[in-house]
Image (tube, grey):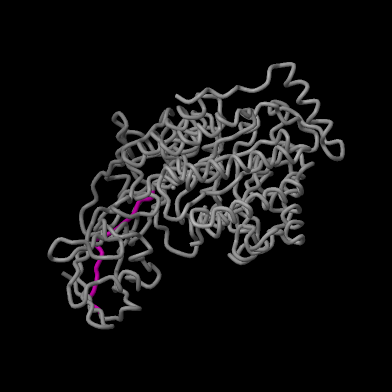
Amino acid sequence: MNDIRQPARHRGRGPGRLIALALALFVMLGLSGGTAFAAPDDAEKPSHAVWVPASAKDVVAAMQPSWNLGNTLDAIPDEGSWGNGQTTKATFEKVAADGFRSVRIPVTWSDHQSATAPYTIDATYMARVKQLVDWALESGLYVVLNVHHDSWMWVEKITSDHDNVMARFNSTWSQISTTFREAPRTLVFEGINEPSFANATEAQKFQYLRELQTSFHRLVRASGGMNANRLLSLTTPAGAPEPAFMNDLYTTIAGLNDSQLVAQVHFYSWYPFSVNVAGGTLYDAVAQKHLDDTFANIRTTFVARGIPVYIGEYGLLDYPNHFHPDRTERGEALKYYEHVNHTARAVGVTTALWDPFGYLNRDTLQWRDQALFDWIKSSWTTRSGTASFDKVFVPKSAPITAKSLTLNLNGTSFRGVWQGGTKLVAGRDYTVSGTRLTLTANALTRLVGNRAYGVNATLQARFTSGLPWNIDVVTNDAPVLSNTTGTSTAFAVPTQYRGNNLATMHSTYADGTNAGPTDWTPYQEFNRAFSPDYANGAITLTPDFLSSLREGVTATLVFHFYSGQTVTYKVTKSGTTVTGTLA
């Protein structure tokens, strides 16, 4: 991931049976320390006594599921610079014990390499990279090793400094190849992460990337040893699964005529949903279709032609982030994870969860949100039912009435509704008509109790497979916002949430134009332009948003909440003073 903070000639399908047997023998004899390998059918994951299949397709299948050691060796300038400290062998043992079969280790080499010829990589740093790779292999994991943020730090300058960039890229991979020449085939090389090319046209991007990846392929193969038959991962511009990008990658792979090549793309969902901008508050039909269409294209372009695919990064952009309010609603995020991993299984591709810090706590080696991890893990092997939302809102200021949700069965069958260990009574507490689940007024009256604002009870809709779907019963009323004054660097709207959760903010001027830093949509980006502060009863408007406002011109803000309620508010900036009034 580039952040801290998207008919050609048919390739061969691999060696025949005799060649495959000879190749397997070669692989086993070439391992240091007498290490042997076993097929995926013989073991859950690679270990010191595992045979790595000759077929690239089978190897990539054996790597599922995969995990990224993100924001670590790829951090700038050093391993601990982005808050993840120093990785230990226990990190790899943890992810292996919890069901991962491979790990991607992103590495940024720039700050540990001379910037001029011969572009020597610091020996201490190379030894540290090797130590982590060895630990992961010893933990029984396949490993993907790459050149990561170098892509935008210096590789993108190939458009203006072609010869020097190519010399540095080649030197980098020559040194990596030499260091890992005798590593087992459980180590996979990835040429370049999310490559970018400054001021290049699409055609130029294809040209430069083909040159880089062809040179990477030639260098690694020529280095001999286990590199002669090591899996090599090639990608698209920015790692994006755009149809034109993938078609060009297929052309490159087919032209290399090497059965040990893997196509890699990344997937972070429909952008408006992934970052909650432009009204992308729900994992709706548009976001679902985007995923279905993308994976259908992946299958057509690569899988159907016998080319294995590694989704080297997937997730949502900046979710989960335990240092900021969740920009993606939890239940909607769970639907995405369930969908992406089911579709990956159906298409036959391997997925690698991008984990910069949000999933595994690198200090405690515990999942920061065990329930979220459990949901992801379940989606590797089975489907789970969901519903149209994970909350029902019961207004405190009105009589209690029945509330309904639509069940998304996802190939399962509905079993019933539970509260803890108690099963609710069908017909009395809830009814089901087709896929419409209705909680009765009598049941809700019991569940909300004294009707304090917020979550009064949590139910579970259970299905014949997968995990149950949690449904929070929430007492709420319309939020109350108050007038206030602040500055262009610190402005918070006093807010009584009264059981509500903020979904998005619509921001316009009286002339109909959009107000805010994201000027192509009135619905501003969550946490970039605005952010809820539930603990302190406020909605924060960020300096980024406030600095974008026109001087002396009132902007009308409409705050949308997941209950469906809205509140209109007006802000005006005059010099460094910002005034907010309830509309």
Q: Residue at x 52, y 27 (%)?
A: 303
Which percent across, then down, holds residue 208?
Answer: 51, 46
User: Which of these two is toward me, 409 or 36?
Assistant: 36
Residue 450, magenta (yes or no) = no
Q: Tell me the magenta residue range.
A: 472-484
Q: Is residue 417 left or right of residue 214?
A: left
User: Which of these two is toward me, 324 or 266?
Assistant: 266
Q: Is residue 222 left or right of residue 301?
A: right
The furthest residue to the front: 163
Q: Residue at x 55, y 46 (%)?
A: 353
Magenta stretch, overall SS: strand
Residue 475, magenta (yes or no) = yes
Q: Quadrant of the C terminus?
A: bottom left
Which percent across, then down, holds residue 485?
Answer: 26, 81
Which percent across, then down, holds residue 247?
Answer: 45, 33
Where residue 374 sits, quadrant-wise, is: top right
Q: Number of labelled discs?
A: 0
17 vs 191: above or below: above
User: Which of these two is toward me, 450 or 522?
Assistant: 522
Q: Is residue 444 left or right of residue 106?
A: left
